[in-house]
Amino acid sequence: MRHLPVFLRVRGRKVLVVGGAPRAAAKLALLGAAGARPVVIAPAVCGEIAAGAADGRIRHERRLFEPSDVADCAVVIAATGLPPVDTAVAEAARRAGVPVNVIDNAELSTFITPAIVDRDPITVAISSGGASPALVRELRSRIDRMLPSRLGHVARFAERFRDTVKSVVGDYTARRRLWDEIIGGPIADAVERGDEPGAAARMLALMNDHVAGPNPPGTVYLVGAGPGDPDLLTLRAIRALQRADVVVHDRLVGSGILEMARRDAERIYVGKEKSGHAMTQAGINALLAARAEAGDTVVRLKGGDPFVFGRGGEELDYLRQRGISVQVVPGISAAAGCAAAAGIPLTHRDLASSVTFVSGHAKDGAPRLDWPALAQGRQTIVVYMGVTTAPLIARRLIAHGLAPGTPVAVVENGTLPDQRVLTGNLRDLATLISANRVTAPALIIIGEVVALSNAVSNAAAPSLAQADAAQSVARAAAAMSVAV
């Protein structure tokens, strides 16, 4: 961060603005909204400032700035646009220990004023540290459109009940969960609709439910973290992360995604890789159950989608058998995300009418797949966890009739900044991986659709007739050979 974000309390305090141009008027509007007592020093002022002085909202002194003017000020704004004057204002404020902002001059400023989205008492401040004001304006516009117009009413409603909730629910963790339920559920929805009496009735009923007995058991969220890019997380996944007491995550979940969790959430790494496991699957199952039974909100973060080679089904079954509440939050699968990032359509009307996801890894290391079915044409094969077993996969597919020249792509670190897309043909798949030192995570895509990849020239793409001819020759050869 270039600046420490803070909110200054200026209500009822003197603030000084030096300069009378429209740029000064914009700052005065913010200061007035915060309840400050603004004083403007300038020989002449624009119409907006003059109107504020006429109705008593602003005190205007028609003269030049003097260093003693900064005394007893909460903040000082230099807005003349004249470098010698603005510099003099900044130096006087620094000597007096008063925060100063010089408009359009971050070097002279000791603080900057961010772009603001106002849903009083909720205030969202956005800053680029002076790097890109245009980007800040765009972000402010997006956030303004996204936030409900009555969000401030929700905040004031919560404020009304804050002391009552604290007295009724003494435990901090239980109280935080109660507020999560209030803000993320039908009570806040009712306030946003304008039904505050109905919201209050629901609020009292909810608190009564929390008065008696021990903390209710927690919930486990099985969350798909997508193929790696934090921007591909779903909104529901982000909401789950922000409510989590515990985040149990795999190896392929990057730091950018973990940073979206609550700061005080406990993070537990349970990643698995070929050389060893941080925790066995049985241990992960037991951990999820134990933390939920203790009342925690648990997010189980899995790369891609939890139900596509993520063993999410096993965890779901284990938890349900123990009566633990489970919610599944789908994620963008690695196949969909990596293929899209590489410009490869998984299906295509002319090239592939189906797509099959297979695992290149099994318990004994060798995949047991329906090779004859996979070797049929006009389909796309997506191989997860297949870097090590790629030579075997290529041999088996060719032996069962898939053309050796079938296009293949290897997508390493798909959707991430260091993504690599390597293309070739099935015959040379093993060499493609070894020569380029491909490491996991990597996805292998096999099929004619690969010819449409961003990494392949359209001019080099084989025609459908050529593909069919090659397929026929390969099948004939396979019929006369012994399957590998």
Image (cartoon, rainbow, N blue to C red):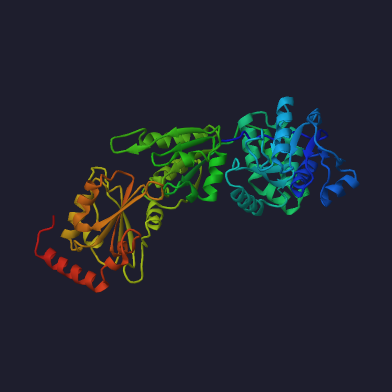
Above or below, 362 against 6 in this view is: below
Towards the viewer: 315 or 214: 315
Q: Position of residue 388 (x, y in %)?
A: 24, 45
Residue sitting at x 38%, y 53%: 338
Q: Specify the quadrant that holds the N terminus.
A: top right
- Residue ID at (28%, 65%): 448
The x, y position of residue 230, in whole percent, is 48, 46
Q: Residue at x 49, y 37 (%)?
A: 247
- Position of 452 compared to 237: left or right? left
Residue 30 in which image quadrant? top right
Is 457 left or right of 416, judged from the image as shown? left
Q: Is residue 325 left or right of residue 46?
A: left
Q: Dividing the picture into quarters, in which one does residue 476 lie?
A: bottom left
- Classify 401 as above or below 133: below
Which one is in front, 279 or 333?
333
Quadrant location, the C terminus: bottom left
